[in-house]
Amino acid sequence: IFEDDSTCLNEELFTMAKTTVTLSSGQQMPLIGLGTWQAPAGEVGKAVKLALESGYKHIDCAACYGNEDEVGATFAEVFSAGTVKREDIFVTSKLWNSEHKPEDVRPACEQTLKDLQLDYLDLYIIHWPQAFQKVPGTNRAFPRDADGNIIYNTETPLAETWKAMEALVDAGLVKAIGLSNFNSKQVAAICDAARIKPVCNQVESHPYFQQTKLIDFCKARDVQVTAYSPLGTGSEINGQKIVQHPTLKAIGEKYGKSAAQVAIGFQVARGVPTFPKSVTKERILQNLDSFIALSSEDLDTIAGLDANLRIGWGGPQVERDGKTEPRDVHHPDYPHKPDVEF
């Protein structure tokens, strides 16, 4: 996937990658990380290696991505070579929906640690609030009935899953725990019941879907919002993708940056860590070089692009009774129900 095997040890990028936010746990989370979702087998390991050797300090993983073993092989190679130290890298992974029963949480985490070839995670988060039925022998199941419908677990309260997550911190398997794709009511419920507070809530956020209300809500509870899909995963308004938007292009021209870099820089300017995904050398390096001193006028202009356009629904949109709706919308813990504001 790369033009050659060389790496770009750009000192400026390396320094920028140390720019962080402080979590409630006291940990420093780098503001730009590498996402590994939908990174193909045979390519994700090379991408992670290039990223680590180019100054990235945060790698965002998940069991359900199905590539943690390849990422782990890269971690082992890079860390054993001594060019990058494990303690200098912030590694996040996620508990999949099929592992919400308290007795399944630790084995799922231990499988992720085995796959990633790590002794601990810096952060382990609940990937989605809605739970699926457990399938023995895997920590990333998509159980389906004879008609192809997801088989749900509606009996396990999120509070019980959270207690099992807290036990991972007690055991030293993870340094911090958090949430992903939780709405404001769900965040509040976990915070109110928690012995160990969630340090973050990782959600979709980009110029077309900025999540300002949720960010403010979480900040008031000392929960750091982090952003996946900062480039919108192909979302369009009036036929324009984020990476092609003329407003973002015009802002970028002032700083010698692309529209994509402006979109990433927008999250950085808001203090929201983000994880753009790429497996191409040029994009991996460009994404890290997105620390831009955007003016208040620039930020206001980008804020004006918000259209509340959510792309990620936790699964595909499906046809039911003549209408299109998210696959998991009828699960009691599904976060994006029509009556939930944010």
Image (cartoon, helix red, strand yellow):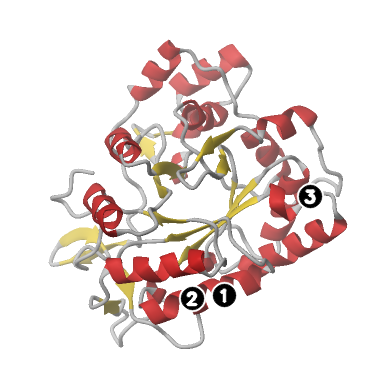
Which quarter of the figure has residue 284?
top right
Name which residue lies at 79% across and 57% down: 79
Residue 19 position (above or below residue 188): above
* Circle on res. 106: 2
Amino acid type, callout 1: Glu
Disc 1 marks which residue?
Answer: 110
User: Hey, what amino acid is under mark 3?
Assistant: Val
> How far apart, in angstroms, are the residues tagged by discs 1 and 3?
23 Å
Locate residue 164, reporting x and y percent. 40, 71
Between discs 1 and 3, the one toward the N terminus: 3
Q: Is residue 195 above or below residue 111?
A: above
Cα distance in 3D space between marks 1 and 2: 6 Å
Q: Nearer the viewer, residue 247 or 274?
A: 274
* Residue 186 in view: yes
Q: Which residue is mark 3?
A: 84
* Image coordinates for residue 297, horizontal then vertical, percent: 41, 11
Residue 139 visible in rendering: no
> For numbered disc 3, what is the local secondary structure?
loop
Q: Which mark is residue 211?
A: none
Q: Residue at x 57, y 66 (%)?
A: 172
Q: Position of residue 336 (x, y in %)?
A: 24, 53
N-terminal of the two: label 2 or label 3?
A: 3
Between 184 and 292, the one nearer to me in the picture: 184
Number of numbered discs visible in the structure rendering: 3
Q: Secondary structure at mark 1?
A: helix
Classed neighbour count for the residue bearing mark 3: other residues with Cα under 10 Å, few (<14), some (14–19), many (≥20): some
